């Protein structure tokens, strides 16, 4: 029998896999989703603020956030490095814990830990500040608790039992994600003991009962907190009626995703996007990982793992039940298990079950040791590729965030406080309106001290008709408790912004005809345009907004467009024309033809009707659907009455086939 990996080799193996899966794009990733409000709290209100901030949500998370944010400054790079360390610790902790559970099955312990390390169904690693604290640190506590339970059982030391119980407390109380995880301890113990089913159950209960008491205590706490206490987040629907068919369908869907599909989804994702460079890099990394990992595991993984012939069956049973137990908390909140989205964070509680299930299947179906190792190495390598693929998604998201914040800074140098920024939605996946709110306040009020929140960004698609944004009538109060500070204003203090999927950020202006120009956009956006008050944008700021963490990008089309739109707001049409000429001289051009409209108007307003007409014709030739926008601009020019050549304007409007 070959020896298992040495104490020196194992940490190196885990470190190399951690870096390969999560570290290659680390310098070009940043903050996402709830990272931003948490970083803003840490920066401006201090780590101690997390205790009251989490009181209405998950009060036992507050101390974890307090500790980590006291240790790590609110800088994206530091948190991504910290996330890498935490991932490495998860792998080492899992390896140690499963060696305690299966001391004679070292190969299973090693492979299980490596599967958990790269588990491909969980894509939220890069939302580091949020998920390190919310899930991964409590997960480490729980995994170590399993290990100390078996260390106490084998060495008969009460001290280890106490440690296991304390770790269980630290793992189960901070987040409801791991409410179902305690069932795994029972299953590990049940399959550890010998005897018939009743004998095993009795032996298991003798060891498990103190952990069961803590689980019952946690259940009682959750029932109180969610139903009677101060909880204010997702609605819990555990008491709603589920039909047998619904439960069966949900169980099969969960088993398929967490037990099977996650291990091969990278092949689906990459093959469907070939020949994209990212797909080739992902497949190449997986192939390289498999090439290097297979011989190492063949040399170091034991050929025998004791004489436990029933181990594969026990792994499959534990895996299936573990997956289903892990789904319970999110199912109780009626939240979907959607892979490759923020909802796949719920799969963190299924990582152990999902890993054990697939390992058990391979152990059961494949008898040859070498073939098993090759398959295990392939699955680990696919997990590495999946996480690299995910990292690239977050890299692009971070890049897009930088573009948005810099375009906002160029277009809106400063902003009156108590302003409500309204938009339908931003063209980005991993941030919401409240995610944007934190960095907007950060960049416009970099010296903020505790007071009412100066700004808020709201998605009309999500908020309109709700408590925060009841309606778009003038003077409607807009109030929102942003954790421990409040935003308070009204719909009379609004600036409406819009950014298409392919195009630049712009401020919508009712006086410019934007209500007609963007009439085909969602009604929740267009209905807000009459509220947009551009006077709230301060154009001559002493300290213009400066996005943090993002170096100013090279000036492309969107730089010249946003600066031109700002000049247009000031009525400086000569500057608008100059900016257009500068952009064209550098061979820049817009992706969105609507961005030509302010330049058409500027040429007309500066007396160059011929260029304005030629540009209008060129825009319509490029996109016939632009007629509404082009005609609206010319109708605005005509209605303004300050441009010479009224008859020429009328003729242009006629030639453009605009409605009278």
Image (tube, rainbow, N blue to C red):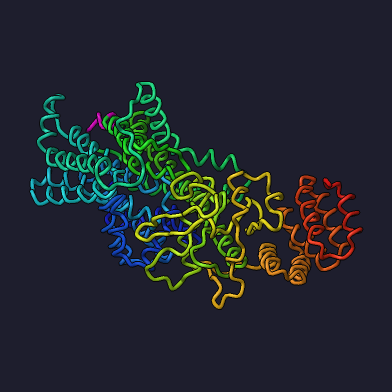
78 displayed left or right of 93:
right
Residue 49 appearing in the image: yes
Q: Could you tell whether 111 is left or right of 166 in the image?
A: right
Residue 649 belongs to the span the image colors magenta: no
> Does residue 399 lie above or below 122 as drawn?
below
The x and y percentages for residue 456 are 48, 58
448 over 637 or under it: above or below: below
Q: Nearer the viewer, residue 593 or 110?
A: 593
Q: Is residue 288 visible?
A: no
Count of numbered labels shown in the rendering: 0
Q: Residue 430: percent from the left, percent from the top?
A: 49, 51
Q: Position of residue 444 (x, y in %)?
A: 50, 68
Identify the magenta region. 308-313
Q: Nearer the viewer, residue 106 or 481?
A: 481
Quarter residue 540 falls in: bottom right
**Residue 246 located left or right of residue 431:** left
Q: Is residue 491 above or below residue 311?
A: below
The x, y position of residue 223, in whole percent, is 23, 39
Q: Is residue 311 magenta?
A: yes
Could you tell me which quadrant the N terminus lies in?
top left
User: At 57% across and 47% down in the image, what residue appears?
Assistant: 279
Relative to residue 289, is residue 92 drawn left or right?
left
In the rendered image, the residue lying farthest to the bottom is: 542
């Amino acid at each position: 029998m070959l020896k298992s990996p040495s104490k020196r080799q194992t940490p190196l193996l885990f470190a190399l896999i951690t870096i390969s899966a999560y570290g290659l794009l680390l310098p070009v990733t940043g903050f996402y989703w709830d990272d931003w409000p948490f970083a803003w709290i840490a920066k401006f209100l201090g780590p101690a603020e997390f205790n009251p901030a989490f009181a209405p949500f998950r009060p036992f998370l507050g101390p974890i956030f307090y500790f980590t944010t006291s240790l790590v400054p609110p800088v994206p790079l530091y948190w991504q490095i910290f996330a890498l360390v935490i991932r490495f610790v998860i792998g080492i902790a899992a390896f140690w814990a499963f060696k305690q559970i299966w001391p004679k099955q070292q190969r299973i312990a090693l492979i299980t830990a490596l599967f958990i390390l790269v588990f491909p169904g969980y894509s939220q690693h890069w939302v580091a500040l949020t998920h390190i604290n919310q899930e991964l640190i409590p997960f480490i506590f729980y995994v170590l608790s399993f290990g100390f339970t078996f260390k106490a059982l084998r060495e008969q030391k009460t001290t280890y039992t106490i440690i296991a119980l304390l770790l269980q407390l630290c793992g189960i109380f901070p987040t409801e994600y791991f409410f179902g995880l305690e069932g795994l301890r029972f299953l590990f113990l049940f399959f550890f003991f010998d005897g018939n089913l009743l004998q095993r159950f009795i032996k298991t209960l003798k060891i498990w009962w103190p952990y069961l008491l803590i689980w019952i205590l946690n259940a009682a706490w959750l029932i109180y907190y969610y139903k009677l206490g101060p909880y204010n987040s997702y609605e819990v629907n555990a008491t709603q009626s589920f039909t047998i068919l619904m439960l069966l369908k949900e169980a099969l869907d969960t088993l398929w995703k967490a037990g099977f599909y996650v291990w091969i989804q990278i092949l689906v994702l990459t093959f469907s996007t070939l020949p994209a460079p990212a797909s080739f890099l992902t497949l190449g990394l997986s192939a390289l990982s498999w090439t290097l990992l297979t011989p190492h595991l063949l040399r170091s993984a034991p050929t025998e793992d004791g004489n436990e012939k029933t181990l594969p069956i026990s792994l499959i049973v534990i895996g299936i039940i573990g997956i289903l137990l892990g789904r319970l908390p999110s199912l109780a909140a009626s939240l979907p298990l959607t892979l490759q989205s923020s909802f796949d964070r719920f799969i963190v509680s299924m990582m152990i079950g999902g890993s054990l299930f697939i390992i058990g299947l391979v152990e059961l179906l494949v008898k040859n040791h070498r073939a098993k190792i090759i398959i295990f190495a392939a699955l680990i390598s696919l997990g590495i590729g999946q996480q690299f693929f995910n990292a690239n998604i977050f890299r692009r998201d971070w890049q897009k965030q930088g573009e948005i914040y810099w375009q906002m800074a160029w277009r809106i140098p400063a902003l009156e406080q108590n302003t409500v920024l309204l938009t339908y939605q931003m063209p980005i996946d991993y941030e919401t309106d409240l995610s944007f709110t934190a960095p907007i306040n950060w960049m416009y009020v970099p010296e903020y001290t505790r007071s009412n929140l100066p700004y808020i960004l709201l998605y009309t698609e999500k908020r309109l008709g709700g408590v925060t944004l009841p309606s778009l009538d003038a003077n409607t109060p807009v109030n929102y408790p942003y954790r421990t500070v409040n935003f308070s204003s009204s719909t009379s203090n609004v600036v409406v912004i819009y950014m298409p999927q392919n195009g630049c950020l712009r401020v919508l202006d009712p006086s410019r005809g934007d209500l007609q120009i963007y009439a085909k956009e969602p009604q929740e956006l267009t209905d807000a345009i009459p509220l947009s008050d551009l006077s709230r944008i301060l154009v001559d700021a002493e300290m213009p907004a400066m996005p943090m963490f993002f170096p100013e990008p090279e000036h492309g089309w969107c730089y010249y467009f946003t600066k031109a739109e700002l000049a247009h707001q000031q009525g400086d049409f000569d500057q608008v024309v100059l900016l257009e000429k500068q952009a064209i001289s550098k061979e820049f051009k817009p992706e969105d033809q609507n961005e030509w409209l302010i330049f058409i108007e500027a040429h007309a307003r500066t007396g160059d009707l011929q260029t304005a007409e030629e540009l209008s014709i060129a825009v319509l030739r490029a996109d016939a659907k632009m007629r509404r926008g082009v005609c609206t601009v010319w109708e605005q020019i005509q209605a303004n009455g300050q441009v010479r050549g009224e008859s020429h304007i009328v003729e242009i409007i006629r030639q453009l086939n605009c409605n009278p």
